[in-house]
Amino acid sequence: MLPVLGKISLFPYDFEPGNWMYCDGRLLPISDNETLFSLVGTTFGGDGENTFGIPDLTNINPSNCKYCIAIRGTFNDNYYEGFVGDTMLSVAPPTAPNLMECMGQSLAKPQAPLLMIYMGSRFGGDGVKNFNLPDMRGAAPNGLRYLMAVQGNDPNFPRDPYVGELFLLPYEIESEKLLLCNGSRVSTQSHGALYSVLGTRFGGDAEQFALPDLRTVTPPQYNYYISPTGTLPPRA
Protein backbone atom coordinates (compact mmCIF):
# COMPACT_ATOMS: atom_id res chain seq x y z
CA MET A 1 0.00 0.00 0.00
CA LEU A 2 1.36 3.41 -0.95
CA PRO A 3 1.81 6.01 1.81
CA VAL A 4 0.44 9.54 1.70
CA LEU A 5 2.74 11.64 -0.46
CA GLY A 6 4.81 13.97 1.72
CA LYS A 7 4.15 12.00 4.91
CA ILE A 8 7.12 11.81 7.27
CA SER A 9 7.50 8.69 9.39
CA LEU A 10 10.10 7.36 11.79
CA PHE A 11 11.59 4.00 10.81
CA PRO A 12 13.84 1.68 12.86
CA TYR A 13 15.60 0.17 9.84
CA ASP A 14 19.18 0.58 8.62
CA PHE A 15 17.92 1.15 5.06
CA GLU A 16 15.45 3.35 3.18
CA PRO A 17 12.17 1.50 2.53
CA GLY A 18 10.80 1.58 -1.00
CA ASN A 19 8.93 4.85 -1.82
CA TRP A 20 10.67 6.57 1.11
CA MET A 21 13.82 8.67 1.46
CA TYR A 22 15.83 9.76 4.49
CA CYS A 23 15.01 13.30 5.66
CA ASP A 24 18.58 14.49 5.26
CA GLY A 25 18.04 17.77 3.43
CA ARG A 26 19.18 16.55 0.03
CA LEU A 27 18.12 18.25 -3.19
CA LEU A 28 15.87 16.41 -5.64
CA PRO A 29 15.26 17.08 -9.33
CA ILE A 30 11.85 18.68 -9.90
CA SER A 31 11.47 16.82 -13.21
CA ASP A 32 11.36 13.47 -11.39
CA ASN A 33 9.23 14.63 -8.45
CA GLU A 34 6.77 17.21 -9.78
CA THR A 35 3.85 16.33 -7.49
CA LEU A 36 6.00 16.31 -4.36
CA PHE A 37 7.50 19.64 -5.44
CA SER A 38 3.98 21.07 -5.76
CA LEU A 39 3.54 20.33 -2.04
CA VAL A 40 6.97 21.33 -0.79
CA GLY A 41 8.11 24.14 -3.06
CA THR A 42 11.43 25.58 -1.92
CA THR A 43 10.57 25.54 1.79
CA PHE A 44 13.59 23.33 2.43
CA GLY A 45 15.94 24.66 -0.24
CA GLY A 46 16.59 24.32 -3.95
CA ASP A 47 16.35 26.84 -6.77
CA GLY A 48 12.69 26.13 -7.59
CA GLU A 49 13.53 25.71 -11.27
CA ASN A 50 15.51 22.52 -11.39
CA THR A 51 15.77 21.36 -7.77
CA PHE A 52 14.00 21.46 -4.43
CA GLY A 53 14.96 20.29 -0.96
CA ILE A 54 13.44 17.83 1.46
CA PRO A 55 13.48 18.41 5.24
CA ASP A 56 16.66 17.78 7.20
CA LEU A 57 15.68 16.02 10.43
CA THR A 58 19.01 14.33 11.07
CA ASN A 59 19.53 16.29 14.29
CA ILE A 60 16.35 14.88 15.87
CA ASN A 61 16.67 11.25 14.75
CA PRO A 62 16.44 8.96 17.81
CA SER A 63 19.22 6.43 18.22
CA ASN A 64 19.16 3.85 15.40
CA CYS A 65 15.97 5.33 13.91
CA LYS A 66 15.60 7.76 11.01
CA TYR A 67 12.85 10.04 9.77
CA CYS A 68 11.89 9.37 6.15
CA ILE A 69 9.63 11.22 3.72
CA ALA A 70 7.27 9.48 1.30
CA ILE A 71 8.47 10.56 -2.15
CA ARG A 72 5.92 8.32 -3.90
CA GLY A 73 2.37 7.92 -2.65
CA THR A 74 -1.30 8.78 -2.76
CA PHE A 75 -2.47 12.35 -3.21
CA ASN A 76 -5.63 14.48 -3.16
CA ASP A 77 -8.87 12.78 -2.08
CA ASN A 78 -7.57 9.26 -1.45
CA TYR A 79 -8.77 7.89 1.90
CA TYR A 80 -5.92 7.26 4.34
CA GLU A 81 -5.97 3.54 5.20
CA GLY A 82 -4.04 3.70 8.48
CA PHE A 83 -5.05 3.22 12.09
CA VAL A 84 -7.54 5.56 13.68
CA GLY A 85 -5.57 8.17 15.62
CA ASP A 86 -2.40 7.53 13.62
CA THR A 87 -0.44 10.79 13.87
CA MET A 88 2.22 11.83 11.41
CA LEU A 89 4.40 14.71 10.34
CA SER A 90 3.68 16.12 6.89
CA VAL A 91 5.11 18.74 4.55
CA ALA A 92 1.62 19.82 3.47
CA PRO A 93 -1.92 20.32 4.79
CA PRO A 94 -4.15 17.22 4.76
CA THR A 95 -5.61 16.16 1.43
CA ALA A 96 -7.19 12.84 2.44
CA PRO A 97 -10.75 13.32 3.74
CA ASN A 98 -10.07 11.48 7.01
CA LEU A 99 -6.91 13.41 7.96
CA MET A 100 -6.96 16.61 10.03
CA GLU A 101 -4.22 18.90 11.22
CA CYS A 102 -3.72 18.73 15.00
CA MET A 103 -4.77 22.24 16.02
CA GLY A 104 -6.73 21.59 19.23
CA GLN A 105 -10.08 21.68 17.46
CA SER A 106 -13.21 20.11 18.90
CA LEU A 107 -14.99 17.23 17.13
CA ALA A 108 -18.49 15.93 17.78
CA LYS A 109 -18.76 12.21 18.54
CA PRO A 110 -20.50 11.37 15.21
CA GLN A 111 -17.53 12.81 13.31
CA ALA A 112 -15.07 10.27 14.70
CA PRO A 113 -16.77 7.76 17.05
CA LEU A 114 -14.00 5.13 17.02
CA LEU A 115 -11.33 7.73 17.73
CA MET A 116 -13.32 9.02 20.71
CA ILE A 117 -13.56 5.47 22.09
CA TYR A 118 -9.78 5.06 22.03
CA MET A 119 -8.62 8.61 22.76
CA GLY A 120 -11.44 9.94 24.93
CA SER A 121 -11.03 13.43 26.35
CA ARG A 122 -7.29 13.29 27.05
CA PHE A 123 -6.82 16.48 25.01
CA GLY A 124 -10.05 18.17 26.10
CA GLY A 125 -13.79 18.01 25.52
CA ASP A 126 -16.37 16.19 27.62
CA GLY A 127 -15.61 12.73 26.21
CA VAL A 128 -19.31 12.05 25.80
CA LYS A 129 -20.63 14.34 23.09
CA ASN A 130 -17.36 15.85 21.93
CA PHE A 131 -13.59 15.67 22.26
CA ASN A 132 -10.56 17.68 21.20
CA LEU A 133 -7.62 16.87 19.01
CA PRO A 134 -4.22 17.78 20.45
CA ASP A 135 -2.79 21.17 19.59
CA MET A 136 0.62 20.28 18.15
CA ARG A 137 1.28 23.42 16.13
CA GLY A 138 4.28 24.32 18.27
CA ALA A 139 5.68 20.79 18.39
CA ALA A 140 6.40 20.19 14.70
CA PRO A 141 9.78 21.11 13.19
CA ASN A 142 9.85 24.23 11.00
CA GLY A 143 7.93 23.81 7.76
CA LEU A 144 6.10 20.70 8.96
CA ARG A 145 2.77 19.98 10.66
CA TYR A 146 1.19 17.10 12.55
CA LEU A 147 -1.80 15.34 10.97
CA MET A 148 -4.09 12.76 12.56
CA ALA A 149 -6.35 10.10 11.05
CA VAL A 150 -9.67 10.93 12.72
CA GLN A 151 -11.25 7.97 10.97
CA GLY A 152 -9.43 4.76 10.19
CA ASN A 153 -8.86 1.12 10.97
CA ASP A 154 -9.25 -0.39 14.41
CA PRO A 155 -5.71 -0.95 15.80
CA ASN A 156 -6.76 -4.45 16.85
CA PHE A 157 -7.10 -5.30 13.16
CA PRO A 158 -3.98 -4.13 11.32
CA ARG A 159 -4.09 -3.34 7.58
CA ASP A 160 -0.96 -5.30 6.61
CA PRO A 161 1.73 -2.89 7.88
CA TYR A 162 5.42 -3.33 7.32
CA VAL A 163 7.19 -5.55 9.82
CA GLY A 164 8.86 -3.08 12.18
CA GLU A 165 6.71 -0.13 11.11
CA LEU A 166 6.29 2.48 13.86
CA PHE A 167 3.00 4.14 14.76
CA LEU A 168 2.48 7.25 16.88
CA LEU A 169 -0.87 6.79 18.62
CA PRO A 170 -2.68 9.05 21.15
CA TYR A 171 -3.86 6.20 23.36
CA GLU A 172 -2.75 2.97 25.03
CA ILE A 173 -3.54 -0.43 23.60
CA GLU A 174 -2.64 -3.97 24.59
CA SER A 175 -2.42 -6.13 21.50
CA GLU A 176 -0.20 -8.83 20.03
CA LYS A 177 -0.38 -6.84 16.79
CA LEU A 178 1.31 -3.75 18.26
CA LEU A 179 4.17 -3.72 20.77
CA LEU A 180 4.97 -0.70 22.93
CA CYS A 181 8.32 0.91 22.10
CA ASN A 182 9.70 0.97 25.64
CA GLY A 183 12.96 -0.92 25.15
CA SER A 184 11.60 -4.23 26.42
CA ARG A 185 13.00 -7.52 25.15
CA VAL A 186 11.00 -10.08 23.21
CA SER A 187 11.66 -13.64 22.14
CA THR A 188 13.42 -14.10 18.83
CA GLN A 189 11.64 -17.42 18.41
CA SER A 190 8.23 -15.78 18.77
CA HIS A 191 9.07 -12.68 16.70
CA GLY A 192 11.40 -13.96 14.01
CA ALA A 193 10.14 -11.59 11.31
CA LEU A 194 10.72 -8.55 13.50
CA TYR A 195 14.17 -9.81 14.48
CA SER A 196 15.02 -10.16 10.79
CA VAL A 197 14.65 -6.39 10.29
CA LEU A 198 15.84 -5.14 13.70
CA GLY A 199 18.45 -7.65 14.80
CA THR A 200 20.16 -6.44 17.97
CA ARG A 201 20.48 -2.78 16.88
CA PHE A 202 18.48 -1.76 19.98
CA GLY A 203 20.11 -4.29 22.31
CA GLY A 204 19.62 -7.87 23.39
CA ASP A 205 20.93 -11.02 21.77
CA ALA A 206 19.94 -13.80 19.40
CA GLU A 207 17.50 -15.25 21.94
CA GLN A 208 15.89 -12.06 23.22
CA PHE A 209 16.25 -8.82 21.30
CA ALA A 210 15.24 -5.33 22.39
CA LEU A 211 12.56 -3.12 20.92
CA PRO A 212 13.26 0.58 20.32
CA ASP A 213 12.85 2.76 23.40
CA LEU A 214 11.17 5.91 22.13
CA ARG A 215 9.61 7.15 25.36
CA THR A 216 11.84 10.21 25.63
CA VAL A 217 11.00 11.42 22.10
CA THR A 218 7.27 10.74 22.22
CA PRO A 219 4.91 13.76 22.46
CA PRO A 220 2.89 14.05 25.71
CA GLN A 221 -0.11 11.70 25.93
CA TYR A 222 1.22 9.67 23.00
CA ASN A 223 2.88 6.28 22.57
CA TYR A 224 5.02 4.76 19.84
CA TYR A 225 4.13 1.20 18.88
CA ILE A 226 5.91 -1.21 16.54
CA SER A 227 4.32 -3.86 14.34
CA PRO A 228 5.85 -7.32 14.85
CA THR A 229 4.03 -8.79 11.84
CA GLY A 230 3.05 -7.78 8.32
CA THR A 231 4.88 -7.41 5.04
CA LEU A 232 8.66 -7.24 5.01
CA PRO A 233 9.64 -3.68 4.03
CA PRO A 234 11.06 -3.37 0.50
CA ARG A 235 14.40 -1.68 0.12
CA ALA A 236 14.65 1.45 -2.00
Image (tube, helix red, strand yellow):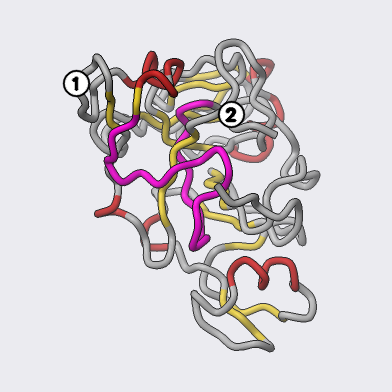
Seen at 44% across and 23% down, the residue is 32
Q: Secondary structure at mark 1?
A: loop
Q: Nearer the viewer, residue 185 or 104?
A: 185
Secondary structure, mark 2, is: strand
Asked whether 13 falls inside the magenta stretch, the response is yes
Q: Would residue 122 be found to the left or right of residue 79 on screen?
A: left
> Which image quarter holds the N terminus?
top right
| Residue 57 is inside the magenta segment | no
Depth check, front residue: 73 or 103: 73
Mark 1 → mark 2, Cα distance in angstroms = 33 Å
Q: Residues within 10 Å of mark 2 (few under 14, many from 20)?
A: many
Q: Residues within 10 Å of mark 1 (few under 14, many from 20)?
A: few
Q: State if disc 2 and disc 1 touch (CB < 8 Å).
A: no
**Amino acid type, mark 1:** Asp
Q: Residue at x 28, y 34 (%)?
A: 27
Q: Quadrant of residue 136?
A: top left
Q: Nearer the viewer, mark 1 or mark 2?
A: 1
Above/below status of 90 relative to 34: below
Residue 45 lies, in percent from the top left, at 20, 28
| Identity of the residue drawn at 29% across and 52% down | 58
Please state the horizontal and vertical placement of residue 156, each as a whole percent of the image: 78, 47
Which of the two residues, 131 or 75, is positioned nearer the viewer here? Answer: 75
Mark 2 = which residue? 149
Q: Where does residue 111 sit, x and y in percent of width and height?
A: 64, 16
Q: Which mark is residue 5?
A: none
To which residue does mark 1 refer? 47
The image shows a total of numbered marks equal to: 2
User: Which region shows up in magenta?
Assistant: 5-28
Q: Looking at numbered disc 2 in the image, what kind of residue is underneath it?
A: Ala
The mark that comes first in sequence, 1 or 2, is: 1
